[in-house]
Image: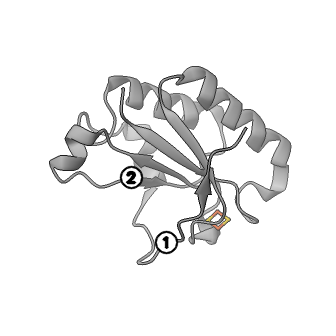
Amino acid sequence: MAGCSLTVCRGCCCGTENKKQAAARLDYLRQRLPSVDVRVSDCLGPCKRKDVIVVHPQPKQRKQGEKPTWLSLMHNMSALEELADWLDAGGPGAVLIPINLADNVFRPPAKSKKRSRRAG
Ligand code: FES
């Protein structure tokens, strides 16, 4: 798990329906994955997707060419638990993505915004 990181979109559209639940989901990820760097970002670009999370592979996998995995509709706890289990097992490039997250994966926009920041 060490070395993976997450970028969680908290832009204007992601999770707009319930910002309080979005904050709870962020808290869950930070507590469940204390050694994973969980960053918050403004809009990453694909707003129509909602509740976007980008999973960055460990450096070893990155050096082997593994790309970040973009997930959308990460608004329910079962999806977050699957994500946490995946990262516990090694994450992108180390182990296959759980089948239950397969429908959440999408291709990233050609040009994503890079305005991430660490949030408290
Ligand atoms: S607000 Fe999340 S991708 Fe735009």
SS of the residue under disc 1: loop
Q: Quadrant of residue 89?
A: top left
Q: Is residue 2 above or below residue 26?
A: above
Quarter residue 26 falls in:
top right
Residue 64 is marked as: none
Q: Residue furthest left?
A: 64
Instruction: Tell me which colouring the rendered structure shows.
Output: one colour
Q: Residues within 10 Å of mark 2 (few under 14, many from 20)?
A: many
Q: Position of residue 107 (x, y in %)?
A: 39, 66
Q: Quadrant of residue 29?
A: top right
Q: Residue at x 63, y 70 (%)?
A: 48
- Asked whether, in this view, residue 74 is left or right of residue 15, the answer is left
* Amino acid type, label 1: Ser
Residue at numbered disc 1:
112
- Residue assigned mark 2: 69
Q: In the picture, which quadrant includes the N terminus?
A: top left
Q: Is residue 112 left or right of residue 20?
A: left
Q: Amino acid at mark 2?
A: Thr
| Quadrant field for ligand 1 | bottom right
Judged from this view, the residue extending furthest toward the bottom is 110
**Residue at the location (45% across, 74% down)?**
109
Q: Is residue 24 left or right of residue 102?
A: right
Q: Residue at x 48, y 29 (%)?
A: 84
